[in-house]
Image (cartoon, grey):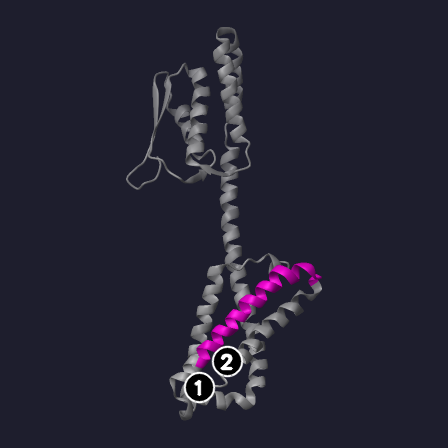
Amino acid sequence: MKQQVELHIGFMDWLYIVIIGAFFGFFISLFFYFLNPHIQESATIIFAVAMAITISLFSIVLITISNNYILPNVNEAFWHLLSFVFSFLAGALGVLVSFWFFSNQNFALIGLLRPYIFYIAITTGFLTFLIGLILHKFIAMKYRHEEIKSSILESKIKTLEGELNPHFLFNALNSMSELVFVDQKKAEEAVLHLSQFLRNAISKDSLITLEHELEMVKTYVEIENIRFSDKIQFHVILPPLEVLVPKFSIQLLVENAIKHGYMGRLLIIDVYMNSNSNPT
C-alpha cells in the first residue's frame, strides 16, 4: 500500500473528479425529480449538484492532508483504516454541510430529506469510500502506465548510449599518440576535444537539448578528422530549436554515416529540417 503515499494526484485529476461529481449529482437529482412530483423543481437539481461538488471538495482537502501529512508518518498497518476514515468523512461531511447550507431555503427536497439526513450522510460516506477506491485504482493505473512508458524510453536511451562504438576511443587515442610526434599543438587540442566529448558522454542525463547534442557531434567529428585528415565536413542547417533529444541519437547516425559513407574522399554530412519539421 506504499503507493497510497507515493501516488501524486494532479490538479487535472482533481478537476476531473469534481466534474464527474457534478454530473453524478445531476443524474441523482433527476432520480429524485421524477420520483416525487412534489420536488419537481429546479431547486432539487441545484441542491443535488451542489452536494456532489461539496463532497468532491471535501475529498480533495481530506485526501490531500491524508496523503501528504498523515499516512507518511504512521505505520503501514493503519493506512487502510485511515484511508477509509478520510474517504468516509468526505462523503458524510459533504452531505451534512450541503444540507446545513441550504437548510434555510424553501426547497421541497430539504423537507423530504430532513428526517433521514444523518442516515443519508452515513450511507454516502460508505459510497464515497467505494467510489474513492475505484478512482484511486484508476489514477494508480494511469500513473503506472506513464511510469512504464518512461521506463521503456529510458531503456531505449541507455541502449543507444551502450551502442557508442568503443573502437572510436581506441582509434582516437592511437591517432593522438601519432599526432604528438607530428603536431604537438594539434595533439593538445585533440585531447581537449576528447576530454570534452567524454565529459558529456558520461553525464547522467538521458535527454539533452538538441543544441547540446549537436555540439557533441561536432566535437566527435573533429576527433574523427584526426584520422581522416579533415575530409569529413559536418553542417547544421537548423533554426534554433528548444527541444530535448536522446543523448547520442544524432551522434550514432553520424558515426554510421562515416563508417559506411567514407570512401577515402571528402564526406559531407548535413543535419537539416525536413518537410515534417523533424531534424534529419
Chain part drawn in magenta:
47-76
- Secondary element type, mark 2: helix
Q: What residue lies at 52% left-to-right and 67% top-to-bottom?
A: 135
Residue at 65 percent of width and 62 percent of height: 71
Q: Horizontally, is 140 left or right of 243 in the view? A: right
Three-letter residue code for mark 1: Phe
Residue neighbourhood size for the residue with mark 1, other residues' Cα within 10 Å, grouped as few (<14), some (14–19), many (≥20): some
User: Where does label 2 land, which residue?
Assistant: 101
Q: Quadrant of residue 258?
A: top left
Residue 155, relative to residue 200: is it above or below? Answer: below
Q: Nearer the viewer, mark 2 or mark 1?
A: 2
Find the residue positioned furthest to the left: 275
Say which mark, if any, is on residue 32: 1
Q: Position of residue 95 (x, y in %)?
A: 53, 79
- Where is the N terminus found, in terms of image quarters? bottom right
Please name whichever residue, 192 or 89, is drawn nearer the observer in this view of the structure.
Answer: 89
Q: Which of the two labelled residues, at mark 2 and mark 1, occupies the earlier sequence position?
A: 1
Circle 1 SS class: helix
Asked whether 62 falls inside the magenta stretch, the response is yes
- Residue placed farthest to the top in the image? 181
Residue 209 vs 53, above or below: the answer is above
Does residue 75 appear to the left or right of 35 in the view shown? Answer: right
Residue nearest the observer in this picture, 102 or 163: 102
The answer to whether residue 200 is above or below residue 12 is above
Residue 30 is at least partly visible in this image: no
Q: CA distance from mark 2 to mark 1?
A: 19 Å
Give how far across and how far down residue 214 sits, in percent. 42, 30
Question: Mainly helix, strand or loop, the magenta region?
Answer: helix
Which of the image's four quarters has the C terminus? Answer: top left
Amino acid of disc 2: Phe
